[in-house]
Image: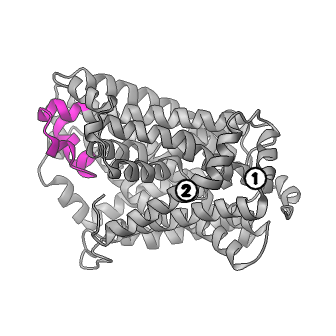
Amino acid sequence: MKEPKGSKQTEVSRGRFSGRIGYVLAVAGSAVGLGNIWRFPYLAAKYGGGMFLFVYIILMVTFGFVMIVSETALGRMTKKSPVGVFHSFGKTMLFHFGGWINAIIPMLIVPYYCVIGGWVLKYLVEYLKGGVNLLAGDDYFTNFIASSGSVEFWFVMFSLLVFFVILAGVKRGVEQVAKVMMPILVVLAVFVAIYSITRPGALEGVKYFLVPNLENFSWMTIVAAMGQMFYSLSIAMGVLYTYGSYIGKDVDIEKSTTQVEFFDTAIALLAGLMIIPAVFAFSGGDMKVLKAGPSLTFITLPKIFSSMGIGSVVGIAFFLMFLFAALTSAISLMETSVSSFEDELHWSRPKCCLLMGVVMVMVGTASSLGYGTLDFVQIFGMAFLDFFDFLTNSIMMPFAALSTCLLIIRVVGLKKIIEEVEYSSAFRRKKMYSFFLKYLAPVCIAIILISSIANVLGWISL
């Protein structure tokens, strides 16, 4: 096996987290985002409630654990961002592809992510202004995303928040924001969840979400849970490589990964308890309302909030929490992109931030105008935002994850990764890690990729 090149010389000048807590909160902040608050509840509602939750947790503590540990260990071993990690072990086409696909994914995700973050910011401002009934209007969300000027404005506002945090650096920006926002996010999530589950009729929703029922199980439950795990845990986005490169040898990778798993699951549970019981209480258990899909957050929930006695307060709390979740994830995606530019171009952080800002404006503007001025442009029947989401999450991320597996199995070697983890960890799940990475991870990745392509071609419905 080739030894990673350049790991020593970059460690001194490279940004670093202050310690394990800063790292865990930053990774948890990356994991806890739109995937948990927006995507997880509607997928759980659509694909079996408790069965979806059960399958998701099983996949997270196996497949998810393996991928988090792998990417983090490679990042710490090389002290590089994704491109540098792969180049440390070779310069052939395989290494170029594996490194750059992991680096490009966050560059494509963060612009459209900021568009959705802009939607969240807009809703929060409207709730603060007392517009609880306005937001509950039948066509409010549709008219809003079609109003190109307004959507573009809120996209820019959200992007600027992210931009200034990244400009501040790893410790003073990324870590400090995570340390402040994550505890507040948890408190707000607990408040909204308690209020939701105490509504009349909500307990049926709690039962549907928490109790596995085999009658609700299908093959699509596994496929959807697997795809959600990628999205939620920041796997195959280059984030974990980058954040791994910011930690020292004293950070226990296994323990930190377990804490991230716990944090991610806790927020996913709270998100489900915030939304699914409230929908049950509001609709009387109408499955059509429950399975509304992505519109659940921006169309169904505002209607529920408007029917509550303190709907404005709950709406403010929910969208403030949603904003914090979106910000922490967007920050991690942009940090990964900026770090890749710093490593490969050898530019200063401000110049790399500016370059990423240009990318964000180009891709983000197309996404923000995709339902309005540019709605006549469709790619495979999808608007720009939907297309970028499909391209990154359903096509590029499985390839990125597969390249990581191949790098470890064929080049680095499991022994070297295990040694890296055991430098600061007992690595109690070592046998499971080795077995899953060698035999099951590639199968899971292939299932996600094939299912996603079959879905866009209309062969199956996700």
Q: Residue at x 67, y 51 (%)?
A: 70
Percent position of residue 210, x then y:
33, 29
* Among the 4 quarters of the image, the one containing residue 393: bottom left
Q: Residue at x 62, y 39 (%)?
A: 176
Q: Is residue 90 above or below residue 221?
A: below
In the rendered view of the protein, which quadrant contains the C terminus? bottom left
Whole-number angstrom distance, CA of label 2 to CA of label 1: 27 Å
Q: Which mark is residue 227?
A: none
Query: Is 288 included in the stretch rendered in magenta?
Result: yes
Task: Return the residue nearer the eye: 125 or 145.
Answer: 145
Q: Which mark is residue 333?
A: 2
Q: Is residue 458 above or below residue 169?
A: below
Q: Nearer the viewer, mark 2 or mark 1?
A: 1
Specify the amino acid type for callout 2. Leu
Percent position of residue 281, x then y:
17, 29
Q: Which mark is residue 414?
A: 1
Q: Residue at x 11, y 51 (%)?
A: 138
Specify the amino acid type for callout 1. Leu
In the rendered view of the protein, which quadrant contains the N terminus? bottom right
Query: Is 300 included in the stretch rendered in magenta?
Result: yes
Task: Return the residue nearer the eye: 355 or 257.
Answer: 257
- Over which residues does the magenta segment extend? 277-304
How packed mark 1 is, by other alpha carbons closer than 10 Å (few <14, some 14-19, many 20 or more), is some
* Among the 4 quarters of the image, the one containing residue 24: top right
Residue contact at pointers 2 and 1, CB within 8 angstroms: no
Q: Main secondary structure of the magenta part?
A: helix
Percent position of residue 304, x then y:
18, 36
